[in-house]
Image (cartoon, rainbow, N blue to C red):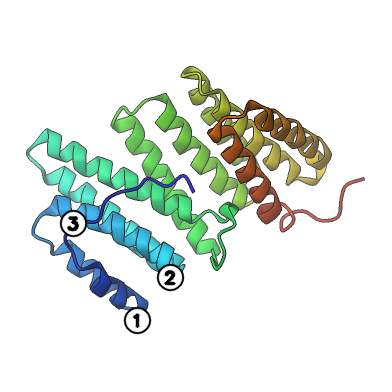
Amino acid sequence: MGIVDTSPSEPDFASLLALVRTGKVVEAISIVEAIPDPMAASVAFIELSKQVYREFRDVSSMVALGNAGTQFALLKAASSENSADAEKFRNYARILAFNTAANCWPGWGDAGIDIKNDDLEAGLKLAVLCRDLVVELSLGHKAQGKSHWLIGALDLAMGQYAEALAELQLAKAEFQAVGESDSVLMSEGYSALALKAQPESRVSGGNELVRLLELLGNRGSKDAQFFAKQLITADRVLIPAQVGPSDV
């Protein structure tokens, strides 16, 4: 799913997951925040959020953990007297923001996932935070491209097509700057989806999507194949729910 991975830390994740499963996510957050090593706590937020999504398909609890964890890491960054540590905390916040926002996007088509409007809105806020941290941390064009893509993908899912197209253009430009040609085509593919979702451009968007899927399919790289499958799934999951009868 394009999610950043991390290794488990020392906390008892089985106990924390049991709390989340019984609706005690606030208690689980408090336990993680109380971990003596704030670096370990930041990593624990990332890991716990990932496990809650994977094990329980619980988007609302994942969002609560994502919001709490990013704020925890950013507060620690702000209070740190060590610039290297502050940068690590901001990067942990970025990772958690990206992971949580990405899992708020329904276009993956994951089974058993129920994403509500509130989840989309929360995901979009975290995606914007991720983008801002990418810039602050000077992580480069590829990371900026991914962050713009994520904002655009969430805008697309929310029916905010003009905003989606603007973000996807920014993503394309960032990918072009570092020669990420597969990602350029992917960005264009999502722009085609945003056009296809609108009655006045449904036909042209659909035709453009077919063209881009063919280009990706002919490239042969793992990324290109993944992007093509991802676009096909997003088309199936997102577009039928947002357009009416064909505009013929």
Secondary structure type for disc 1: loop
Task: Answer with left or right where residue 9 lies relative to residue 138.
Answer: left
**Disc 3 marks which amino acid?**
Ala
Instruction: Say if mark 3 contacts mark 1, CB within 8 Å.
Output: no
Q: Identify whether 171 is placed above or below 244.
A: above
x and y percent of residue 175 in the render? 50, 25
- The residue labelled by disc 3 is 41
Q: Secondary structure at mark 2?
A: helix
Mark positioned earlier in the residue sequence (2 or 3): 3
**Closer to viewer: mark 2 or mark 3:** 2
Residue flagged by tag 2: what amino acid is it? Phe
Residue appearing at x 40%, y 38% in the figure: 131
Residue to which mark 1 is pinned:
22
Q: Earlier in the sequence, mark 3 or mark 1?
A: 1
Reading the chain from its start, which is encountered first: label 2 or label 1?
Answer: 1
The image position of residue 26, as x and y in percent, is 28, 72
Cβ atoms at labels 2 and 3 below 8 Å apart: no
- Is 182 left, or right, of 81 in this rendering? right
Q: Which residue is mark 2?
A: 56
Q: Residues within 10 Å of mark 1 (few under 14, many from 20)?
A: few
